[in-house]
Image (cartoon, rainbow, N blue to C red):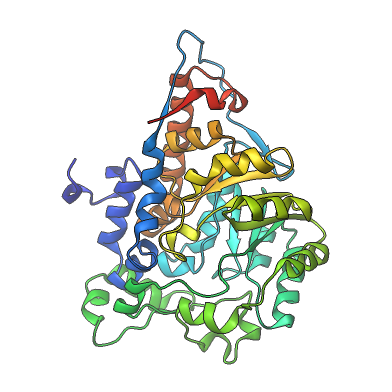
Amino acid sequence: MSIGHIRKLSDCHNVADFRTLARRRLPYPVFHYIDGAADDEVTLARNTAAFDEVDLVPDVLAGGQHLDTSINIMGRKSALPLMLSPTALQRIFHWHGERATAAVAEKYGLWCGISSLSTVSLAEIGANYSGPKLLQYYYHLDAGLNAALVEQAKAARFDAIALTVDTIVSGNRERCKRTGFGSPPRINASNLLSYAAHPPWTLNFLFREKFALPNIEPHLPTGTDTKLSIQDYFDTMLDPSLNWQAAENLRDEWGGTFCLKGIMSVGDARRAADIGVDAIMVSNHGGRQLDGSRTPFDQLDEIVQAVGDRVEVILDGGVRRGTHVLKALATGAKAVSGGRMYLYALAAAGEPGMDRAIGLMQDEIRRGMQLMGVNRIDQLTPDRLRRR
């Protein structure tokens, strides 16, 4: 089916289809915030293209009728080797927002990541949705805000904190500069026609629940009325002095399962293991920070070789297919995490879109395992791969 014919949810059969539908349904500043990345977006493209440079080597006549797709990651069982990466501002993309993400994660038995910049509170997510939950923690200049986030996560019974370590300054997101995207979105003369051309989104944004950042708004100068671009937020509110000692202090203050998100070098992976983190996410922030950086999948093998016996290594970023998940697992990742893989679907059709997207990914993982001749995740080993 050509992309011009993707007009409704049932037309979507993969992540690219959901992206097309999201582009059709969102005002252009909102779509380009999801879709864009830093500088020339070379790393964004490479994050997914890297998977094409490694081939799967299947066995046959192995019997594929009894599949176990489950794993244990960060002390909790997951029905699939898949995590929903935390992404900010979700009610901007669709009014269902983080409630849809938490509900779909609960349905499929997956880890749900929630950002410090979520538009639904940690308290609400903790109270209403079961299953493992992770707070993506941004380290702020405001020590009171840092402490408050930890207390909110504890009160909401979150299962883990992931300190994001690659955002001491914002990447150069030129698409956002061109479209004037802010938080919340600003409707002005330059973009009025785009918002007017997408009345379902615009009416939902204007007349449903007011936009808010409930986890951090008590610490913002003007509360919910603060208008910031993501670049302004990173550059003015986050602490550029974030270092290893601060990470250790946060680990001790939290006292629970602790992860570092944004590790890309072997040296940093070793140091993370040395300070006793439970897991690391090999991630370049979806290509939104340092353009030209190495991709998580390209870097995965050497990090696994260095610390895979000491910490759980999670591949984060670039995943668009179930076969990408299998390739990462065969390289040695304990689990795979992604944001855009479900965010396009959320933007396109809310909770039903996310449900369809994760259901399709589940089918792809199961079918791929059957075609690979494996019945369990631990049978996906490096000998199942060949680099071109």
Residue sitting at the far bottom = 222
User: In this picture, is 219 found above or below 310?
Assistant: below
Q: Is residue 273 above or below residue 54?
A: below
Q: Is residue 1 left or right of residue 291?
A: left
Q: Quadrant of residue 189?
A: bottom left
Which residue extends farthest front?
267
User: At 49% from the left edge and 77% from the top edge, which residue is drawn?
Assistant: 211
Q: Quadrant of the N terminus?
A: top left
Where residue 65 appears, as percent x and y from the top left, is 52, 15
The residue shown at (77%, 68%) is: 245
x 56%, y 48%: residue: 105
Residue 318 location (% of width, % of height): 43, 49
The residue at the point 37 percent across, 31 percent down is: 388
Q: Is residue 37 left or right of residue 86?
A: left
Q: Residue 9 at what x, y percent from top left? A: 31, 48
Q: Is residue 183 above or below residue 317?
A: below
